[in-house]
Image (tube, helix red, strand yellow):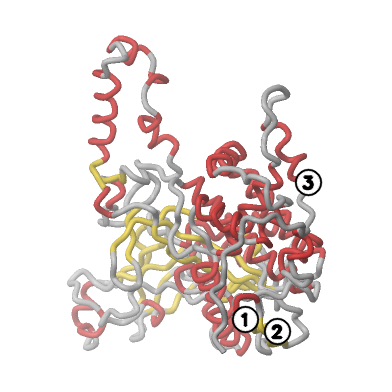
């Protein structure tokens, strides 16, 4: 029969322990048991004065940041609403049911006080945990980057001169500040006045060929460090590039994460990223795998000189030209000449230091009389061919392309690092940066990378079942399918049989 109407009796006090309400196999219980964050108090001790009102425990604030990334939340206020509503988060923070939580301003102030070095240090600590757990193979590295839109609109771009002039005029004609005081000391000018000096990109850097960067002329008022970039769907947005250097082992541990403005190409940061990782982790990998954007002459040479095989497709910019490709010309080291397919010698003319190559030209009389001229060049001065300063290394790397190991590495790259970016965007809020400024977006990216590594570190213990990407939080040796909280399906196991070695 139909039962009576349910009465709302929510005001009566109930004696219950929060610890009894949280399931024993909950993910946050395992995280709290395995990841001791007490060291954070020692790390941040110098950032607090010895007198004054006691602060909120920094360990609690940092736990909130971890929860934010684990849950894919994009707002401190939304995070605190979740913490107030979910018993498991309250238990993880150590707050009773009737205990007030910190406010959103506390989270923001602590992040600003600690700065980027602290979050970089925590990321390195998590990688150390993964190394100690045997999750880092070290014989192979994979490099890639992904584009992430900034929290700024493309319409916020204004001419650079306007930014400087407008801010200076405000400082000079502000009613609360005398013009003489504003002119006597540049330190009284607004922070944006010194923006170009603080920006990691040199505004006076030379352009690539005849190309003029938009960021050389314009700057965003909303996020000055974000630069225009094109997304895969054709949109033009302001954004950044998130660079990952990942271990080639089964666990796919992120060894280094770094964010640059959108116009900074992958090839510009690879070598510094690689050298820093090799020095910090004492690694001696046999090969490095990357896509064609990394295949520049200086990169290939630097990688090979480190004793690492560069499994990288080379950037041959003139591959699609209708004339003979420069690879059809052979080099005679004894005579220092290039030979065309017809046997004509091209003699050395001069160095092109900007393009890092030597230039060789064929005699005009021979070229103009050659029956293959139409397929070789349209110039009446003779065919001009460049030879890279790094030609010996490029030829060595080009020979790798025919080996089975290289072909296997290229297949592995697309399924090894791309899913990490997809995981970060779909599950941890990296579809778009929520913070602004280069330092802040680096903090955001480091937290995401730290959480991705923590998930794999927790999986290595055989614990930490939790809804998420397949294989992210389970014992690598087992395949288990279960039903998680709130009806979420868990798919746990190894990387679907992929063998990193």
User: Is residue 289 among the parts visible in the rendering?
Assistant: yes
The residue drawn where x is 60% and y is 80% is 487
Position of residue 468 measured from the top left corner of the image (x, y, whole percent) = 61, 75
Q: Pick whichever, 260 or 33, lies toward us.
A: 33
Which quadrant is home to the C terminus?
bottom right
Question: Residue 39 — which label?
Answer: 3
Reply above or below: 408 against 388: below
Q: Earlier in the sequence, mark 2 or mark 1?
A: 1
Q: How many marks?
A: 3
Position of residue 203 measured from the top left corner of the image (x, y, whole percent) = 35, 42
User: Is residue 130 among the parts visible in the rendering?
Assistant: no
Left or right placement of residue 234 versus residue 393 in this view? left
Reply above or below: 309 against 96: below
Q: Pick whichever, 293 or 200, lies toward us.
A: 200
Which quadrant is home to the N terminus?
bottom right
**Circle 1 Cα neighbour tier, 10 Å, few/some/many (<14 / 14–19 / ≥20):** some
Give the alpha-carbon distance from disc 2 to disc 1, as whole Å. 7 Å
Callouts 2 and 1 close, C-beta under 8 Å:
yes
Query: Which residue has dot 1 on it?
Result: 470
Callouts 2 and 3 close, C-beta under 8 Å:
no
Give the alpha-carbon distance from disc 2 to disc 3, as whole Å. 31 Å
Quick one: SS at disc 2? Answer: loop
Q: Pick whichever, 300 or 270, lies toward us.
A: 270
The residue drawn where x is 28% and y is 25% is 168
The residue drawn where x is 64% and y is 49% is 120
The residue drawn where x is 42% and y is 68% is 387
Callouts 3 and 1 close, C-beta under 8 Å:
no
Quick one: SS at disc 3? Answer: helix
Give the alpha-carbon distance from disc 3 to disc 1, as whole Å. 31 Å
Q: Earlier in the sequence, mark 2 or mark 3?
A: 3
Position of residue 70 measured from the top left corner of the image (x, y, whole percent) = 61, 63
Question: Residue 493 — which label?
Answer: 2
């Amino acid at each position: 029969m139909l039962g009576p109407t349910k009465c709302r009796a929510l005001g009566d006090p109930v004696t219950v322990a929060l610890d009894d309400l949280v399931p024993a196999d909950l993910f946050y219980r395992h995280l709290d048991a395995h990841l001791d964050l007490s060291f954070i108090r020692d790390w941040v001790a110098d950032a607090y004065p010895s007198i004054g009102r006691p602060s909120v425990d920094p360990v609690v604030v940092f736990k909130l940041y971890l929860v934010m990334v684990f849950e894919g939340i994009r707002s401190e206020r939304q995070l605190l609403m979740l913490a107030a509503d979910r018993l498991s988060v309250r238990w993880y923070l150590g707050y009773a049911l009737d205990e007030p939580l910190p406010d959103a301003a506390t989270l923001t102030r602590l992040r600003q006080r600690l700065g980027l070095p602290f979050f970089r240090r925590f990321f390195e600590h998590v990688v150390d945990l993964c190394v100690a757990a045997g999750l880092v193979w070290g014989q192979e590295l994979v490099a890639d980057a992904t584009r992430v839109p900034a929290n700024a609109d493309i319409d916020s771009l204004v001419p650079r001169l306007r930014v400087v002039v407008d801010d200076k005029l405000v400082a000079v004609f502000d009613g609360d500040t005398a013009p003489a005081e504003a002119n006597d000391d540049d330190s009284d000018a607004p922070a944006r006045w010194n923006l170009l000096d603080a920006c990691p990109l040199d505004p006076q850097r030379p352009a690539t060929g005849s190309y003029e960067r938009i960021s050389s002329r314009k700057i965003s008022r909303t996020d000055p460090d974000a630069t225009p970039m094109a997304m895969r769907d054709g949109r033009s947005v302001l954004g950044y590039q998130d660079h990952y250097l990942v271990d080639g082992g089964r666990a796919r541990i992120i060894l280094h994460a770094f964010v640059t403005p959108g116009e900074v190409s992958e090839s510009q940061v690879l070598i510094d990223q690689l050298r820093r990782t090799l020095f910090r982790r004492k690694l001696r990998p046999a090969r490095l795998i990357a896509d064609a954007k990394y295949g520049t002459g200086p990169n290939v040479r630097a990688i090979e000189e480190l004793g690492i095989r560069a499994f990288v497709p080379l950037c041959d910019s003139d591959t699609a030209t209708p004339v003979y490709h420069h690879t059809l010309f052979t080099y005679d080291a004894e005579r220092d000449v290039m030979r065309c397919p017809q046997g004509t010698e091209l003699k050395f003319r001069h160095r092109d230091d900007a393009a890092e190559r030597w230039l060789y030209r064929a005699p005009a009389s021979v070229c103009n009389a050659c029956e293959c001229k139409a397929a070789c060049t349209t110039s009446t001065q003779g065919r001009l061919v460049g030879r890279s300063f790094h030609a010996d290394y490029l030829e060595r790397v080009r020979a790798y392309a025919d080996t089975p190991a290289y072909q296997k590495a290229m297949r592995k790259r697309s399924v090894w690092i791309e899913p990490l970016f997809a995981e970060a965007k779909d599950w941890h809020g990296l579809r778009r940066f929520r913070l602004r400024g280069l330092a802040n977006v680096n903090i955001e990216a480091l937290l995401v990378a730290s959480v991705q590594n923590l998930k794999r570190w927790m999986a290595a213990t055989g614990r930490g079942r939790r809804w998420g990407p397949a294989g992210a939080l389970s014992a690598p040796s087992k395949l288990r399918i279960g039903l998680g909280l709130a009806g979420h399906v868990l798919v746990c196991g190894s990387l679907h049989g992929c063998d990193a070695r």
